[in-house]
Amino acid sequence: DGGITQSPKYLFRKEGQNVTLSCEQNLNHDAMYWYRQDPGQGLRLIYYSQIVNDFQKGDIAEGYSVSREKKESFPLTVTSAQKNPTAFYLCASSIGLARNTGELFFGEGSRLTVL
Amino acid sequence: SQQGEEDPQALSIQEGENATMNCSYKTSINNLQWYRQNSGRGLVHLILIRSNEREKHSGRLRVTLDTSKKSSSLLITASRAADTASYFCATGQRSPGKLSFGAGTTVTVRA
C-alpha cells in the first residue's frame, strides 16, 4: 500500500547527541514536510522540500537539519543545538505545495524523548 | 503565533449529537483544510475548502468558510464514538509551501 513510513516510532536520546528520524514515502509526491507537535500547541513547520536537493526552513528550523537526496526520502536530524527536542515529530508529503494543491499525507509520527 | 485558532479547545458530546468547532485565521489564504488526529497517531485529511468556496460537504462533515470574517466551521453530524479525536484546521497561505495549523479541538463522544 502507498503511504508514508516514519521510523523509529519511539526514540530516546541523551543530551548532546544527534539523532536522525527517517521518513520514506512511496506516493511519488514531490513535496515533503517535517512538523513538530507539542501538547496544546498544534503543529509547527520545521522544514519542507519541494524537489530533490532543495529544501526550505520553516518556522522553527534552528537545531534541525534535513536532506533530500532522493524523492522518496526526507530524513530529519535533531542536533544537540536543539535545546528542547522532546516532542512528537510528524512527516508529511503532498503532490504539490500544500498551499495550492491540497491535502497532506502524514506518517504515524516519531516520539523523541531526551533523557 | 499560529495562523489558525480553533474554538473550543475541548468538546464533549453524547453519541448521536452534532459537534461544531470553529477556526479563525489572520491572513489571506488559498485554502483551508481540516484534519483529524487520533491519540498518538498521524493526522488524516478530512476536507479542503478553497478561498472562493463557501460551503462543502463530505459524508457527515459540513465545512463553511467566511473569508470576510476570516473564519471556518466544521460540523460533524450524528456523532459516533469513533469520532473521538482531535480536529485541526490548517490554512494554506500565500507564502510558498506554508500550511499553518491551529492548536486543535479535542472532541470526546460519549456512548
Image (cartoon, rainbow, N blue to C red):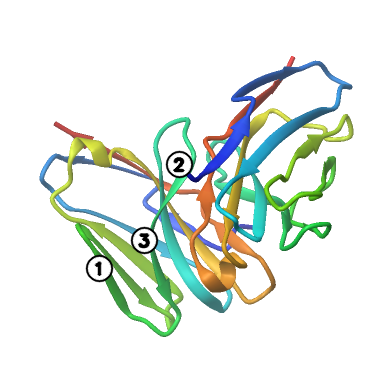
The residue indicated by pointer 1 is B57
Residue B28 seen from this side: yes
* Type of amino acid at the residue the image marks with label 3: Asn
Circle 2/circle 1 CB separation < 8 Å:
no
Q: Is residue B49 above or below residue A52?
A: below
Q: Is residue A58 left or right of residue B71?
A: right
Q: CA distance from mark 3 to mark 1?
A: 16 Å
Q: Residue at x 74, y 62 (%)?
A: A51
For numbered disc 2, what is the local secondary structure? loop
Q: Chain of mark 3?
A: B
* Type of amino acid at the residue the image marks with label 1: His
Q: Chain of mark 2?
A: A
Q: CA distance from mark 2 to mark 3?
A: 34 Å
Q: Position of residue B2 (x, y in %)?
A: 60, 58
The residue indicated by pointer 2 is A1
* Type of amino acid at the residue the image marks with label 2: Asp
The residue indicated by pointer 3 is B22
